[in-house]
Image (cartoon, helix red, strand yellow):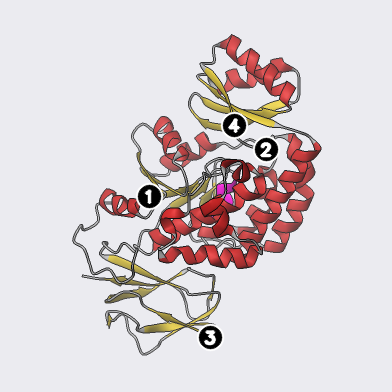
Amino acid sequence: MLAFTFPGQGSQRPGMGQAWVNHESWELVTEASDIAGRDIGDLLLNADAETLKDTRNAQLTTFVSSLMVLDAVERLGFEPSLCAGHSLGEYTALTANGALGFDDGVRLVIERSAAMHEAGLKTQGVMSAVLGLEDDQVETACRRADSDVWVANFNAPGQVVIAGTTDGVQLATDHAKEIGAKRVLPLPVSGAFHTPLMTPARDRLREAIAAAKPRDSDVPIVSNVDAKAHSQGAEWATLLSAQLSSPVKWKQCLQAMHQAGVNRFVELGPGGVLTGMAKRTIESARTLSVSTPDELDKLIEWMGATAQATPVLHEGEHLFAVERLVVSPGAGVFVPNKSIAVGQRISVGDVLGQVGEMEVRSLFEGVLQNFISLDGERLTPHQPVAWLRTH
């Protein structure tokens, strides 16, 4: 079984969009910029580390980057059995699987990051990674500090993040070192996320979540709050709200997916932090990080797909897999082309149906295996519509 994981804030880095500018999936950046009313492309290409550290920039750029990578991976025909995202990445996972529409996902991330930024201004907070201690030892260090400091992330064995006020984190750091921590590293974030210091942001976030109306998803998503798989939209309204001031149980999420049968973890988005955590947590797991177009070829090889190349139809796009997904060009109700039957050979440019007033044209040549979307189903941009086999 295959799981897609999506990184959270802190994975952003300057120039992370440069490799994608000429790839077709860059169109998501343009769409997101229109929705946000901001030039996200400029942030992905030109923003420096200090600019990207701002919570409002870090979350939005990481979210859009991860979905851009996902879009490129979906064009190759790969789909997961389970998904999960670390903190912000949970919003990416929900958008990736249709529980949130693309428009709603962008707006919700903007609202979440703004609420967290304001909460951080009200009470200055910091975060640090404690390396080399067991979970309960780090919790003990926080209790011994007797201050405003808590465990924020259970990332992997021997890697736990604490957060709180500057004084509180320093006191907990001192106790952690006394207990035997190998290192305690400050993190480049601008608030004490996933702690009670974020509580002021919850009311604002609750309203935004209610407006977004999370939907049911076909692919279950493992929650940071309880490390259990959920596919009901109604459950995510409370889970996302609770996540804001609760610790991220990432180690437990990885263990839950592994227990469910997942043995391959693919991280989609900037950096490769989650890949390292998966390796530390699940010794037998196969892991891969995909953050650039060049790494799409590695994914194909890694998945054991056929190495024989098919013709490249669009500059910058990697088309080496046997199966292809045709995706929706936009949002709207899908109506299939009833003159096309399963098993029929499709040529490049053939119209497979309509989404609203937009035609769904195939970018590939192959045999139609099936329609993934149903007649009358409301689709989001880039949602899979049909499945082709090229050989």
Secondary structure, magenta segment, majority class:
helix
**Which quadrant would residue 23 be assigned to in this image?**
bottom left
- What residue is drawn where x is 76% and y is 57%? 207
| Residue 172 shown in magenta | no
Compared to 54, does 367 lie above or below? below
Q: Earlier in the sequence, mark 3 or mark 2?
A: 2
Q: Nearer the viewer, mark 3 or mark 4?
A: 4
Callout 2: SS:
loop
Compared to 378, does 30 lie above or below? above
According to the image, label 1 marks what residue? 2
Mark 3–mark 2 Cα distance, whole angstroms, equals 44 Å
The boundaries of the magenta stretch are: 88-93
In the rendering, at what x and y percent does residue 152 appear?
63, 32
According to the image, label 2 marks what residue? 190
- What residue is drawn where x is 34% and y is 50%? 295
In the rendering, at what x and y percent does residue 304 appear?
24, 52
Callout 4: SS:
loop
In the rendering, at what x and y percent does residue 362 appear?
36, 77
* Disc marking residue 187: 4
**Which quadrant would residue 197 be assigned to in this image?**
top right
Q: Residue furthest top?
A: 178
According to the image, label 3 marks what residue? 357
